[in-house]
Image (tube, rainbow, N blue to C red):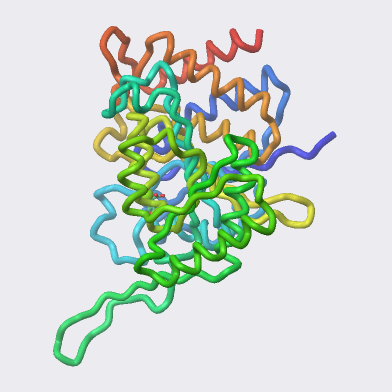
Amino acid sequence: MPANKRLLMLPGDGIGPEVMHEVRRVIDWMDRRRAVTFDIAEDAVGGAAIDAIGMPIAEKTVEAAKAADAVLFGSVGGPKWDGLGFDMRPEIAILTLRRELGLFANLRPAVVLDPLVDASTLKPEVVRGLDLMIVRESTGGLYFGEPRGIEELPDGQQRGVNTEVYATGEIERVARVAFELARKRQGRVCSVEKANVMESGLLWRRVVTALHEREFADIGLTHMYADNCAMQLVRNPRQFDVIVTTNLFGDLLSDLASMLTGSLGMLPSATLGAPDTSGRRHALYEPIHGSAPDIAGKGVANPLGQLLSFAMLLRFSFDMAEDADLIERACTNVLASGLRTADVMAPNCAKVGTQVMGEAVLRELDKLAA
Ligand code: IPM
Ligand code: MG
């Protein structure tokens, strides 16, 4: 008997717990129908943890995340905690997990599902069939570089400092993830930085080029400046297969790319660490959307981003591609049947809330698995 799959669920704040609840129901369904047993633990993070224990994430939660086979994260933050000091912000929870688990490769797909092609603000002919993957470096660069801080100047002014810094190994390992992904996709990587103005960007370009020559000559590699990439993503997004970029540029470009799909509430993401000798790697999965405090508690949030994050978890961490396919197909079919949460509502569709959407996915799973 294989050991149970250890899953840590961190619903967080706002709509996080509401959409995570729908994942629970899919897990119960799998328990019954697919005979897979998960060993599930749950903990508070973000604002919920600040309220409970006075800090955004407990040391024991970090330890539980290290011990788990995979972490499913909801979303954190909200106006209630906006006034807190920088170290006490709910966002520290996710940044701490990325750092402590060494989750350096943040995979953010932007896929336009056929039933939702009209949800994009761009013309259907520009986005139809879009399937791109942004691989964002997520433990280095400007987010973590030293020196950092706000310092006092002799003349009474203050100065805020952050540092963009990348070492060869950090660039190589994230580029390797991108090249390996491209091999299973359309075989193209676009590496994005600002080598025209930043030394860290120049090094980035050299290291990616050298790795490509050494190990990935079968993959098509192009380079692009980040500002041009933002423009190209809006002009002709289908030119891209895999984009690999730095932490800050990846943060910006992935928000942009997600909106090409017109359905932020639908997109999952994965953040992976380095594989150990047995091939096991730390991994955290979360929807791209935030905690959406404006609609929290109303039961109207779209649960599909969280469900698809769970599908990604099954695929990457538990090697359960068949079950991942099943969940993804169920989500697409429900959308095709005309059910929509408010965020992706369209003419001639039926507007439903979080739970009804979740139930529709369960019914579809029943049908697909019959
Ligand atoms: C993201 C978010 C985070 C980031 C915040 C919440 C710290 O915007 O995951 O993209 O900037 O990385
Ligand atoms: Mg972001």
Residue at image x 64%, y 46%? Answer: 180
Q: Is residue 174 left or right of residue 77?
A: right
Q: Is residue 114 left or right of residue 298?
A: right
Residue at image x 30%, y 26%? Answer: 343
Residue 69 appears at what percent x and percent y? 67, 46
Q: Is residue 131 visible?
A: yes
Above or below for 217 versus 182: below
Residue 289 image-quadrant placement: top left
Quarter of the picture containing the N terminus is top right
Above or below for 90 versus 364: below
Residue at image x 37%, y 65%? Answer: 196
Q: Is residue 199 left or right of residue 100?
A: left
Q: 204 or 20: nearer the eye? A: 204
The furthest residue to the bottom? 154
Residue 328 appears at what percent x and percent y? 54, 23
Residue 337 image-quadrant placement: top left
Q: Is residue 61 visible?
A: no
